[in-house]
């Protein structure tokens, strides 16, 4: 049985992951509009990954005999600015997600709910990877100056994520 406080916090995390998915999809649409198909493709992969993250909490709540309660999402922005601004926003989003996972970790420890720890251990590790990956793209965009031939090549490289298909989940 899942303690009420934890059930409620995990339901809120489902919302946060789906909100994150929604944000990535909005960013993908903006990049598609800017004729950056590689960036858009990378962001759509991230959209799918965030839905998979939400489903980890969903399945865990069900496995612990809890109740999944879906909450309303906010509409994301339509325009995010330059590709660098898009990925800076993505990095800020990942840092917020990391903070929410850390809060969940503190809660399950305080409540002594050891069964939730392996789930959160996975997310702690995942967030290190997420921040590092997005942070690298931000660094690359700063290096190429966010335009011209460098951006063209980086966009092509980001488009290869789907072909590789092995990042995260
Ligand atoms: Fe589900 Fe990108 O954090």
Image (tube, helix red, strand yellow):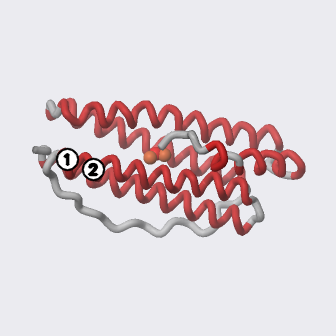
- Element class at badge 2: helix
* Quadrant (top left, top right, bottom left, bottom right) of the N terminus: top left
Residue 39 tag number: none
Q: Which residue is mark 1?
A: 63
Q: How many marks?
A: 2
Element carrying mark 1: helix
Question: Could you tell me if residue 110 is visible in this image?
Answer: no
Residue 154 shows up from this direction: yes
Distance (Cα) linking label 2 and label 1: 6 Å
Describe residue 151's horizontal placement relative to residue 108 as left or right.
right
Front residue (pair 3, 156) = 156
Q: Position of residue 103 (x, y in %)?
A: 31, 38
In the image, the residue with mark 1 has its CB under 8 Å from the nearest atom of ligand 1: no
Name which residue lies at 46% across and 51% down.
50
Q: Residue 22 vs residue 32: left or right?
A: left
What is the quadrant of residue 123 in the picture?
top left
Residue under label 2, please give it.
Answer: 59
- The spot of residue 28 in percent (x, y) is 62, 61
Image: 69 above or below 102: below
| Residue 107 in the image: above or below residue 25 | above
| Marks 2 & 1, CB-CB < 8 Å contact | yes
């Amino acid at each position: 049985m899942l303690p009420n406080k934890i059930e409620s916090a995990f339901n809120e995390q489902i919302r946060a992951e789906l909100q994150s998915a929604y944000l990535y999809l909005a960013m993908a649409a903006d990049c598609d509009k800017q004729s950056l198909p590689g960036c858009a493709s990378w962001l759509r992969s991230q959209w799918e990954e965030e839905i998979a993250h939400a489903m980890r909490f969903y399945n865990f709540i069900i496995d612990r005999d809890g109740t999944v309660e879906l909450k309303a999402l906010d509409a994301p922005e339509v325009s995010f600015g330059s590709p660098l601004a898009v990925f800076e926003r993505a990095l800020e989003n990942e840092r917020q997600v990391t903070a929410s996972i850390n809060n969940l970790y503190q809660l399950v420890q305080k409540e002594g709910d050891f069964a939730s720890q392996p789930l959160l251990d996975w997310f702690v590790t995942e967030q290190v990877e997420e921040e590092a990956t997005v942070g690298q793209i931000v660094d690359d965009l700063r290096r190429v100056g966010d335009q011209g031939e460098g951006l063209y090549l980086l966009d092509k490289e980001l488009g290869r994520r789907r072909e590789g298909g092995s990042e995260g989940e």
